[in-house]
Image (spheres, rainbow, N blue to C red):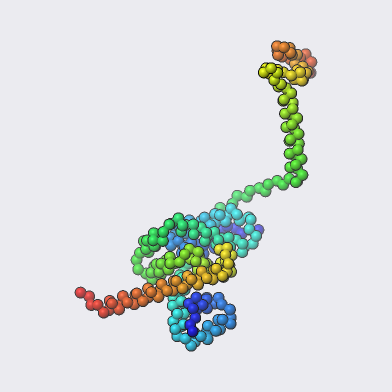
Amino acid sequence: MHYKKETLYFYLKGDMAPSEKEAVRAHLAACPECGKVLNELQELRAVLNQPLIEAPAFTFSPAAKVPAPVRRSSIFKPVFAAGLAAVLIVSGVFVGSLFRAENGEKKVSNFMYKTYSTIYDTDYYTNNYTISSNTLYAMVR
Amino acid sequence: MNPDINELYKEHGKYVYNIAYRMLSNSSDAEDVCHDVFMKLQTGLSSFNGNSAIKTYIYRITVNQSIDYIRKQQSLSSRAEKSVDRISGASKTKDDTLILDNLLNLIDPQSRACILLYEVGGFSQKEIARIMNTRTGTVKSRISRSIKKMSEHLEKEDSKNALQKRNTILLPER
């Protein structure tokens, strides 16, 4: 019986259970053929283990430190989303109430008229705005 | 605290370069692989826990990058031509390098990586399995197959050389 090449190779590497190692050693003492294979494997290992070549001289600049993101409480996101949704709905209703199409003609609604009348003196039919005397007074004061 | 990238290069750069060099049989490709490995490592350095994870990662990228390069190189024949071009002149080291290149070209890239990590990198079969994301049994059988193939090739070469020598002695020069 002779040992397989790969078994003898692992024996050479010392990567083997102690009991198996002992058995191979005993066999090698009595088997010149396996001894010859062992020598060949030693030659192969010598070819594989050539001196290492020096690595190129690279220098790496340390990576820029990215600041850690600010952690927000888990409740913040839903509250913020709900608030934003409410603002969008209210502003949508407001804008919608300003511009109402009647018979295809876009007119300024009563709501807008009432709002603007506090600032401007407005002619409802001609849409000629003049700044109101109350506003002028507030600005001068 | 994570280690400095330049410290890691000092520690592993030589092994990474040599494994890539033996995988590819080409120094400029090996330099590219070596550089890429540490650039990739630099970007993800903060996410590692412990040195063993870093070590596994370094050699895993080395192997993967080298295999990608081999795929790009397309054929083994062009690599053989390259290695012959690279080695000129007659010295023992150069002869040995050529023999090693030829031997490594006999085996598939995965097995080549296993044998290089085992012999050059000094890793255990278990560590290689972790690096290559496979089972220890697979690593052992890849190493065994490679050794068998390479030693058979060496045997053939030896007998061929012996035959050539004998013919030179027997046949007188004209």
The residue positioned 52% from the left and 84% from the top of the image is: A25
Figure check: B100 above or below A100: below
- Left or right: A115 in relation to A10: right
Q: Nearer the viewer, residue A6 or A60?
A: A6
In the rendered image, residue B22, in percent from the top left (x then y), is placed at: 46, 64
Where, by quadrant of the figure, is residue B3 drawn?
A: bottom right
Point out the residue furthest to the bottom here: A30
Point out the residue furthest to the front here: A103
In the rendered image, residue B173, in percent from the top left (x then y), is placed at: 22, 75
Q: Nearer the viewer, residue A111 or B84?
A: A111
In the rendered image, residue B69, in percent from the top left (x then y), is placed at: 47, 57
Figure check: B73 above or below A110: below
The residue positioned 46% from the left and 57% from the top of the image is: B71
- Left or right: B149 in relation to A106: left
Q: Nearer the viewer, residue B169 or A46?
A: B169
Q: How many numbered dots are placed on residues in this image?
A: 0
The residue positioned 52% from the left and 59% from the top of the image is: B64
Q: Can residue B87 be seen in this snapshot?
A: yes
In the rendered image, residue A88, in percent from the top left (x then y), is placed at: 73, 32
Where, by quadrant of the figure, is residue B4 drawn?
A: bottom right
Q: Can residue A54 be seen in this snapshot?
A: no
The residue positioned 73% from the left and 35% from the top of the image is: A84
Figure check: B167 above or below A77: below
